[in-house]
Image: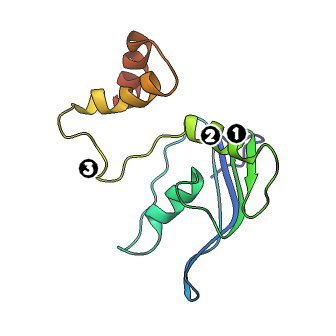
Amino acid sequence: MMKHSNPMVKITNIHKVFGRENHVLRGIDLEINKGETVVILGASGSGKSTLLRCINFLEEPTAGTVEVDNIVVTAGINNKNRESQILDIRKRTGMCFQAFNLFPHMTVLENIIEGPITVLGQKKKQAILYAEELLD
């Protein structure tokens, strides 16, 4: 993968430990450029979902730095902007885990546009256009 001067997503030295001994993520580094498609592949229980959850702070990393669209948050370092930075990261990310956490009464398109309309206040037409691009 070619290095880009400003990756859209950059994670540096991410660690996640559950309890005292379950060290799931060990020093993970990853850069994803805008428009790039990335597959995270691994055996069940290898930490794929945990890594994704750490990127948008659904799970707090034990150590390391997460950067999304130039918003940088370092695990374990609290500052006055931390919560708003995490919210900004969450607004810029969306994740779906294998038919898990989807609204079963909605179509795929409706599931995709729900967040941008409800959280970001996007107009439905604009959200649909973007969702259709994602689905192509």
Mark 2 residue element:
helix
Numbered mark located on residue 21 in the image = none
Mark 3 nearby-residue class (10 Å; few <14, some 14–19, many ≥20):
few
Determine whether label 2 and label 1 are within 8 Å by CB. Answer: yes
Residue at which label 2 appears: 87
Determine whether label 3 and label 1 are within 8 Å by CB. Answer: no
Q: Amino acid at mark 3?
A: Ala
Separation of residues labelled 2 and 1 (CA atoms): 5 Å
Where is residue 35 shown, x and y percent of the image?
Answer: 55, 35
Q: In the depicted view, which residue is nearer to us: 19 or 23?
A: 19
Residue at which label 1 appears: 84
Q: Is residue 24 visible?
A: yes
Residue 90 picture quarter: top right
Q: What residue appears at the point 81 percent right and 45 percent down from the top-left corner?
A: 80
Q: Amino acid at mark 2?
A: Leu
Mark 1 residue element:
helix
Q: What residue appears at the point 31 percent right and 33 percent down from the top-left corner?
A: 111
Where is residue 10 shown, x and y percent of the image?
Answer: 68, 51
Q: In the depicted view, which residue is nearer to us: 130 or 53?
A: 53
Where is residue 131 shown, x and y percent of the image?
Answer: 38, 25
Q: Amino acid at mark 1?
A: Ser
Q: What residue appears at the point 51 percent right and 57 percent down from the top-left corner?
A: 53
Foreground mark, 2 or 3? Answer: 2
Q: Residue furthest left?
A: 105
Residue at which label 3 appears: 99
